[in-house]
Image (spheres, rainbow, N blue to C red):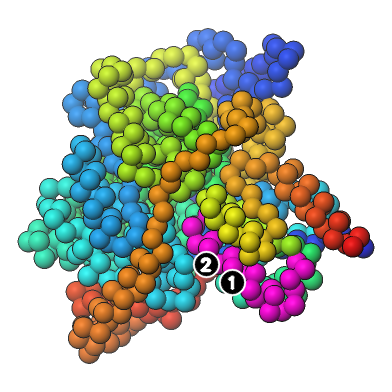
Amino acid sequence: MAGKIRVVVAKPGLDGHDRGAKIIARALRDAGMEVIYTGLHQTPEQIVETVIQEDADAVGISILSGAHMTLVPRIVELLRAEGAEDVAVVVGGTIPTDDIAELKKLGVAEVFTPGAPTSAIVDFLQATLTRESTV
Amino acid sequence: MFGLRIASPAVRFRQTPAVAATEKPQSSAELFTTISGIEVAPVATPETAAIDYERDLGSPGRFPFTRGVYPSMYRGRLWTMRQFAGFGTAEETNERFHYLLEHGQTGLSTAFDMPTLMGYDSDHPRSLGEVGREGVAIDSLADMETLFAGIPLGEVSTSMTINSPAAILLAYYACVGEEQGVPRSELRGTIQTDILKEYIAQKEYIFPPEPSMRLVTDMVEFCTAEMPLWHPISISGYHIREAGSTAAQELAFTLADGFTYVEWALERGLDVDDFAPRLSFFFNAHLDFFEEIAKYRAARRIWATVMRDRYGAKNPRSWLMRFHTQTAGVSLTAQQPEVNIVRTAIEALAAVLGGTQSLHTNSFDEALALPTEDAVRIALRTQQVIAHETGVVNSVDPLGGSYHLEALTNELERQAYDYFDQIERLGGVVAAIKENFFQKEIADASFRYQGEVEAGERVVVGVNRYNLEDEPELEILKIDPALEQKQIDRVQGVRARRDSAAVEAALARLKEDAARDDRNLMHPIVDAARAYVTMGEMCDAFREVWGTWRETPVF
């Protein structure tokens, strides 16, 4: 892959729990990635616009409000509509097991739940995005 | 405008010697500092804990209240067992309230959903997918009537966790009381209203800080005059800690917020002794047992000292810091969730030994979803075991005088005064918020802690040690997605039925009064509530006049 991996870390919906998003943003930056943090209270439209504008390789969606089954599918759908389905969508938060399967079916690359070490997220993004770029 | 000017009594607080724990076993990388990073002496001694009994501790119920706010504490009366509850529509939550009261709970505590907390009605586009998910959806007085149906408001005390739109929810509650024939002067309870910690940590803000603070001060003034049994602000460290702060930051930022509310009320012309006795606090109970107990003790001592010496409060009730405690949600793990029952019990014990006035114990399944009824019952039973089976209630502040605990109490107090100085140099709490001071301090602390966990320097049982390969699935509470539509239908039904001319008039008055700082907004809000103006409509009126707040994202 040419240059650094670019990741948008996004907080959709009304959820104000930004501890996880900030820790992930720092860990990704420390791992050498280019990180764009959207800040809070973003609509799916705003998030997708940022992803397109920043030409991101991946978007990390942090959500702890329980609204993931509404907001995540909407983001995936909008990315597709923009022709950006190659952007890896990763979700983090309190996501019940049944919903994880559902989200992956929709095209989410991976879901990280509470307790996941930041190293696992870094490794996943590096492996996924490096692999994609060699195809 | 308001700066904290609280001189650090440097002479009084001898710094705890930072004795590094040098005798680490070779095999372990684990730290011997507190969870917040305070160095702890391997053995505390009288030199480590320099205290003068009368000056620094005093008897319980006497200045500076380090040992507790009442002389007999739990012998006189146990703490209030108050489980936070709310999900779906007002109907579902009303059922849960009745369940909790039937099982011996002694006070109610209401959790609202995200749209309510952020001032959107359930049918607003931004509410999509969020209605009733992590609390109850309240759009208008009609929902509030349902929420408290069959619950005599003259007999229970109710806590409501809401901040930006707090004034509106307080007005709805007062109207329900009125309908039940209970005058507002007899209503008992607490509404959180702590907007400063929203900017600092929880991030459920709507308006910019200054009009938000004006609205808070309106509520303080209104309650002082008309709701003397109500606590208009619950100054909260809980969310600061959950966002990743240390114990000292939780203590310092919360107290600094408290002083800021006092200063705004004084600026309004209120007498400190008229409102200060109704200010209350809300702290976290995290896992570091002694650090937490020390935090509560230091908090009481600082508050009493500053209220008396800086703000000139003469009524001893103004010096008392009374507080609610909730065990640390952030300490719960999704892995081996049953272990959370143990964590919560230890945290709750720290809150009790620290002299809390009321307590919420988290349910063990809350790292996964909102709690099931069974999980909530175990959480409540945990408090009942502490209260009735362990004997810890028999003696007030039973750990007082422990060298270790007194040293930690002194150290947390010292760190808090250091922070007060820093905040003052930045121009006070509101100015420091705008500079992202608190947000950065908390982000740094939480990142440091995460690094320690990932390096194995801090063990989290079941997460980075003692893991299970195959974890059994846990039965969790699922919120029926149909509830969102049900709530949307409810609010649209209310809008169709009400007198629209009265609504328009109420909203026009709200906007007019919002634009003028010399008007108290509580009365027009109560009038609007009675006319079934929705919460979202009232917040929109204020958004139009005051604008909205957006923080600069930092990480």
Q: Is residue A97 left or right of residue B95?
A: right
Q: How many marks?
A: 2
Q: Position of residue B282 (x, y in %)?
A: 38, 43
The residue nearer to you, when weighing A120 against B438, is A120
Q: Quadrant of the N terminus of chain A?
A: bottom right
Q: Position of residue B375 (x, y in %)?
A: 37, 39
Q: Is residue B260 magenta?
A: no
Classify B189 as above or below B172. Answer: above
Disc 2 element: helix
Q: CA distance from mark 2 to mark 1?
A: 7 Å
Classify A117 as above or below B399. Answer: below
Classify B221 as above or below B467. Answer: below
Q: Is residue A53 left or right of residue B362?
A: right
Residue to which mark 1 is pinned = A74
Q: Which mark is residue A70?
A: 2
Q: Position of residue B492 (x, y in %)?
A: 30, 79
Classify A85 as above or below B461. Answer: below
Q: Is residue B520 left or right of residue B264?
A: left
Residue B173, located in which quarter of the rendered image?
A: bottom left
At 35% from the left edge and 35% from the top edge, which residue is drawn?
Answer: B379
> Label 1 lies in what chain?
A
Amino acid at pointer 1: Arg
What segment is highlighted magenta in the picture?
A60-87
**Is the residue under label 1 in contact with that under label 2 (CB below 8 Å)?**
yes
Q: Residues within 10 Å of mark 1 (few under 14, many from 20)?
A: some
Q: Quadrant of the C terminus of chain A?
A: bottom right
At 45% from the left edge and 65% from the top edge, which residue is drawn?
Answer: B130
Disc 1 element: helix
Same subunit, labels 2 and 1: the answer reads yes
Q: Is residue A72 magenta?
A: yes
Amino acid at pointer 2: Thr
